Amino acid sequence: MEEPTKRELVLHINGEQRTVVVRQAETLLFVLRDHLGLTGAKPGCLNGDCGACTVLANGTPIKSCMILAIETVGKPITTIEGLDDAPIQHAFVRHFAFQCGYCTPGFIMNAQALIDRHPDADDAMIQEWLESNICRCTSYQEIEAAVKEVLKASKTSMTR
């Protein structure tokens, strides 16, 4: 049986150029986890429904289980490891916005994109954005409260 075709990819991950040799059919999720040791994005449903694998590509939240790594060449990718102490991470802790923590990185990445793109987001927009991620352990109230705290703080700092 013939060995699957492998290819060298240069990916821009968390502000660094990273070179990996992968099968062309490998998803970004498993390249991040298995080849680069970035295990924050989690394998959940593996069909794009749960959001546990969410990362940012060009600032847009994507389900890394649904995109081939080769498709992300030339796009800056940010994982939870690349957020580097972002306010939303601290807000999740303050609001106890997690229990088991498995889904938390995906929620944080999605929330970060919302905060960056829509600093004036209202309750309906926050709820709409959070619908792309699933948590089976806790209610979404704590997660929403964390997002609202960061949005409020960013509005306050912008008006000073």
Image (spheres, rainbow, N blue to C red):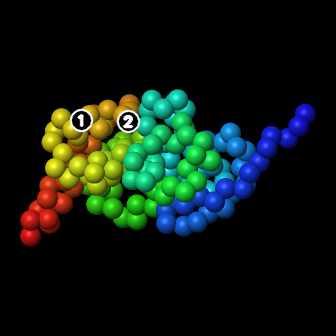
Give the SS element for disc 2: loop
Give the label on residue 13, or none. none
Q: Earlier in the sequence, mark 1 or mark 2?
A: 1
Residue 136, horizontal then vertical, whole percent: 38, 31
Using the image, determine if residue 34 lies above or below residue 3: below
Q: Which residue is at 55% across, 57% downward?
A: 74
Q: Is residue 38 left or right of residue 101?
A: right
Q: Which residue is mark 1?
A: 127
Q: Which residue is mark 2?
A: 133
- Disc 1 residue type? Gln
Q: Nearer the viewer, residue 49 or 74?
A: 74
Q: Is residue 47 left or right of residue 59?
A: right
Direction right: furthest residue:
1
Q: Is residue 145 left or right of residue 87?
A: left
Numbered label tally: 2
Task: State which quarter of the image contains the C terminus.
Answer: bottom left
Answer few, some or many: residues within 10 Å of disc 2's Cα (few below 14, many 20 plus, some between 14 and 19): some
Give the SS element for disc 1: helix
Residue 124, horizontal then vertical, whole percent: 18, 35
- Mark 1–mark 2 CB contact (< 8 Å): no
- Disc 2 residue type? Asn
Q: Which residue is at 38% across, 35% downward?
A: 133
Residue 62, horizontal then vertical, whole percent: 45, 43
Using the image, determine if residue 67 lies above or below residue 148: above
Residue 13, horizontal then vertical, whole percent: 53, 60
For the question of whether residue 92 can be seen, the reply is no
Q: Which residue is at 70% across, 43% downward?
A: 24
Answer few, some or many: residues within 10 Å of disc 1's Cα (few below 14, many 20 plus, some between 14 and 19): some
Q: Which residue is at 48% across, 32% downward?
A: 48
Give the Cα distance between marks 1 and 2.
10 Å
For the question of whether residue 55 can be seen, the reply is yes
Using the image, determine if residue 137 lies above or below residue 56: above
